Image: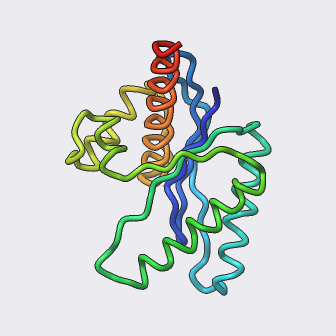
Amino acid sequence: MIILGIDPGLATTGWGIIVAEGSRLGHVANGRIKTDAALPLALRLAILCEKLNEIVSANAIRDAAMEEIFVNKNAQSTLKLAQARGALLGCLGARRIDVGEYAARLVKQAVTGTGAAEKIQVHAMIGRLLPGIKIDGADAADALAVAITHAHHMASARRLRQIQE
């Protein structure tokens, strides 16, 4: 299964693609989508969607996962994040792509074993779980962590279905 992980943001959206075969994980690609703060909001959201569509098309994505919004101290920042996340979800929904949504704490726990892990611990574990990859910045590392979380949750759901049958 090919999984696209997304760490949404208006200025920078991280993305990472993994392949999950049973309990084995492999790296496909990762990167960042950046938008220019000088552009109007509607254009920035359109750029996010356009670039995401290019990534999805180039990689035959059918499953995706995205980090949920956490409330910032700055309400404007939270609103911008929500708008970016909504645009990205809309793009995936229009393509009928299933999207798993995960809280940051759950992502940290799935990747490191503790929900209180620091970003540096999460990024170090990404390097161990996907050895030899070059990560395109912190946002891409976070997106890969979201994809790995989704892979783990999908595997657990499959095992539960097998037990119940």
Name which quarter of the figure residue 130 lies in: top left
- Residue at 54% across / 71% down in the picture? 10
- Residue at 45% across / 20% down in the picture? 160
Residue 33 picture location, percent across and down: 61, 60
Q: Nearer the viewer, residue 85 or 10?
A: 85
- Residue at 34% across / 35% down in the picture? 111
Q: Is residue 112 above or below residue 12?
A: above
Q: Is residue 13 above or below residue 164?
A: below
- Residue at 71% across / 48% down in the picture? 55
Coloration mode: rainbow
Q: How many marks?
A: 0
Relative to 112, is 142 on the left or the right?
A: right
Name which quarter of the figure residue 40 lies in: bottom right
Q: Is residue 111 above or below residue 43?
A: above
Residue 126 picture location, percent across and down: 39, 34
Relative to 118, is 132 on the left or the right?
A: right
Q: Nearer the viewer, residue 20 or 43?
A: 20
Q: Quarter holding the N terminus?
A: top right
Relative to 124, is 161 on the left or the right?
A: right
Residue 47 picture location, percent across and down: 71, 69
Q: Residue furthest front?
A: 165
Name which quarter of the figure residue 64 lies in: top right
